[in-house]
Image (tube, grey):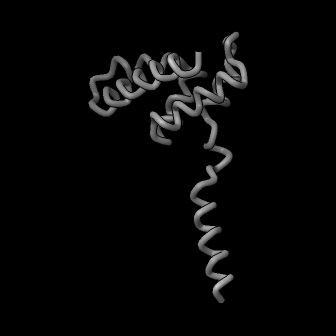
């Protein structure tokens, strides 16, 4: 019985720690699929790590879409909605951290 409980607890812990593959590296995949010359595996991986520490999962999902449609970033930047303003400020801080960390 004790081993069953231990296995269940371990499965629960690892289930929380292991990200879902479809969402784990949205920024990295968008970065690598972009046509930017500096979009190497190591740079994009670094940017993903900074994004994980700087942005929520929903923010990362939204920002990843900006690689394909940069106009949407401008829509958020120019929006008068308070949520968009908060996202833009967090995105700017993320970009500054990524530039310092990943260059």
Q: Is residue 13 above or below residue 7?
A: above
- Residue for point 35% across, 24% down: 89
Q: Is residue 57 above or below residue 4?
A: above
Q: Position of residue 95 (x, y in %)?
A: 47, 20
Corner quadrant of residue 32: top right
Q: Position of residue 39 (x, y in %)?
A: 68, 17
Q: Quadrant of the C terminus?
A: top right
Q: Position of residue 38 (x, y in %)?
A: 67, 12
Closer to us: 34 or 40: 40
77 on left or right of 64 = left
Q: Position of residue 65 (x, y in %)?
A: 56, 28
- Residue for point 63% across, 77% down: 6
Residue pushed farthest bottom? 1
Corner quadrant of residue 74: top left
Q: Is residue 62 above or below residue 80?
A: below
Residue pushed farthest top? 37
Closer to us: 85 or 100: 100
Q: Quadrant of the N terminus?
A: bottom right
Corner quadrant of residue 56: top left
- Residue for point 61% across, 43% down: 23
């Amino acid at each position: 019985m004790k081993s069953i409980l231990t296995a269940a607890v371990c499965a629960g812990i690892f289930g929380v720690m292991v990200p879902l593959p479809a969402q784990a590296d949205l920024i990295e995949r968008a970065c690598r699929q972009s046509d930017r010359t500096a979009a190497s595996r190591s740079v994009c991986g670094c940017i993903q790590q900074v994004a994980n520490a700087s942005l929520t999962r929903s923010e990362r999902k939204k920002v990843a879409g900006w690689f394909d449609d940069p106009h949407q970033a401008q829509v958020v930047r120019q929006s008068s909605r308070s949520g968009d303003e908060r996202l833009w400020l967090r995105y700017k801080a993320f970009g500054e951290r990524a530039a310092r960390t990943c260059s």
